[in-house]
Image (cartoon, rainbow, N blue to C red):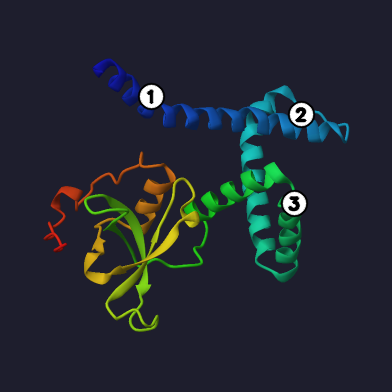
Amino acid sequence: MRLRQRLITGLVTLLPLIVTLYLLGWVYTYSGAYIQAFLRLFGLEVPRAYQPVLPFVGLFLAGVLVYLVGSLAENYLGKRLIVSLERSLLLLPIVRDIYKAVQQIAHTLFGHQEVKFSRAAVIEYPRRGVYALCFVVQSVGGRLPPLPEGYTAVLVPTSPVPASGMVVLVPSEEVLPLEISVEEALKYVVSAGFLLPEKPQSPLTSLPQRAERPS
């Protein structure tokens, strides 16, 4: 058991490092090759002395491309073009699932959230004694009759796509706020629980014990 645990721990420790180094190596190798292939279309050849610099030029051009796409997406015509492209992708059965999953993860990590969560919290869900991480949306108040006041709407996310979770109405006193940021909680959900906050200030062991309701 200890051998298996150490192997799993070593894998979890090395995997992010290996993936990061692999992506950096991929960008360094192929960005220069793409630039050379593009220049060859016009009959141009890069001198051998300047070839080591090409990957950095490719990285810079990639950043410029991302910036231009972001600028395009902020105006009306650009949004219409992107929406048309998305609709075309969503018509393909397998491609649409991959695209939607990657899109939601990207929006979670880097994009602007359409719903601004006030904070991360935990609730007892799906049964007493089991806690689920959630995001506080807003206090319901008396806006959902006949539900009485004193309830809070929270989003219970799913991994690795938090947006596919569901909204639960919970008594406000049963929502236990966590001393971590919403961004840290999102990373925790997207990573399926592997990326815990570096310095948690409110561990689950400190949660107050509630008296059992009479049956």
Q: Earlier in the sequence, mark 3 or mark 2?
A: 2
The picture places residue 47, in percent across and down from the top left corner, at: 75, 26
Count neighbours of disc 1 (C-alpha within 10 A) and say few if under 14, some if 14 to 19, many if 20 or more.
few
Quarter placement of the C terminus: bottom left
Residue 200 location (% of width, % of height): 23, 48
Sequence-first disc among 1 and 2: 1
- Residue type, mark 2 in image: Val
Label of residue 91 in the image:
3
Farthest residue, direction front: 215
* Earlier-in-chain disc, 1 versus 3: 1
Residue at 76%, 60% in the rendered image: 84
Q: Find disc 2 in the rendering and name its residue.
A: 46
Q: Marks 1 and 2: which is nearer the front?
A: 1
Instruction: Please tell me how crowded label 3 is: few (under 14), some (14-19), or many (20+) other residues with Cα within 10 Å.
Output: few
Please state which of residues 46 and 62 is positioned toward the viewer in this rendering.
62
Q: Is residue 182 left or right of residue 66?
A: left
Q: Amino acid at mark 3?
A: Leu
- In the displayed structure, would residue 34 be above or below residue 75? above
